[in-house]
Image (cartoon, rainbow, N blue to C red):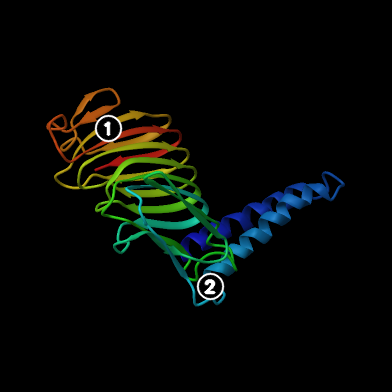
Amino acid sequence: MRRDSLFWGGALILFGVLFLLQTQNIIPSIFPYLWPLALILFGGWLILSAFWKPAQSEEDTFSIPIGQAKNIKYRFSHGAGQIAIGGGAPAGLALVGSSATGMNWSSQLNGDRLDVKIEAGASFVPFVGPSEGVWRFQLAQNIPVTLKVETGASQLDMDLTDVQATFIELETGASSTNVILPARGASLLELEAGMASVNLRVPNGTAARIRVKEGLTSLNVDTNRFPQLDSGMYQSADFDTAVDRAEINIETGLGSISVK
């Protein structure tokens, strides 16, 4: 995370200086200088956050009980920074996660389903986010779940190996995304990616069917595990009969996709 902050902070300062030099003596107005100055200040803020984190309160985690729910629907919204989502919530809890300035959560029981919503702000900005710079969330493993994750300029690491996720919807922008799919049962991943680098991993012993609707994308699919059937479609030989299997639908713009 420190290297990311230094890179993007340095890049924003560089662009800001270039824009500022470009506008000098061309347009006699203060307005052309606002964007360059904003970029310079924001870049400096990112670099500062790489070396200095404010003290956080002692209450840096929170939990949501499952209660009488039979299944859980999670929704995560993350603007920028770094977020990690995986299994491991203790029995009886729907979620355990980071609690800090810039995060809001809610939960509501609708019939047998518990709806959990998490909004996590940019974790690379000083005074906002957990002290280590990474929003971390543990999901329930002993109950069926569905999951929707929306990220912007983020680094997302999501390990669902031991999570009973039947449906996963992932929308990501200019991001770096790593996802390990569930190892047991049948799951469906709907992925919509912008200018992103996405690495998907299907656990050993899990079959998969991959459909790709690609733009200007670098696509790398392990055809030893998932032979290509036709343009944009790859499938394990035993997919139709496998108990443990993942169906993956990918729609992407400019970026890179890897499935292994």
Residue at label 1? 210
Residue type beneath disc 1 = Ile
Q: Nearer the viewer, residue 235 or 140?
A: 140
Q: In which quarter of the image is the N terminus?
A: bottom left
Residue at label 2? 51
Q: Which label is found at residue 97?
A: none
- As measured in the structure, the alpha-carbon distance from the residue carrying label 1 to the one carrying label 2 is 42 Å
Above or below, comparing residue 257 to residue 15 in the picture: above
Residue type beneath disc 2 = Phe
Q: Categorize mark 2 by other alpha carbons within 10 Å: few (<14), some (14-19), many (20+).
A: few
Q: Which residue lies furthest to the top in this view?
A: 230
Above or below, comparing residue 157 to residue 170 in the picture: below
SS of the residue at dot 1? Answer: strand
Mark 1 or mark 2: whose residue is earlier in sequence? 2
SS of the residue at dot 2? Answer: helix
Instruction: Tell me where residue 173 appears, x and y as whole percent.
Output: 49, 42
Above or below, comparing residue 247 to residue 121 in the picture: above
Instruction: Tell me where residue 58 appears, x and y as whole percent.
Output: 49, 77
**In this rendering, would 210 be left or right of 67?**
left
Instruction: Tell me where residue 108 appears, x and y as whole percent.
Output: 47, 50
Instruction: Tell me where residue 32 appears, x and y as whole percent.
Output: 78, 47
Residue in view at x 15 percent, y 29 percent: 240
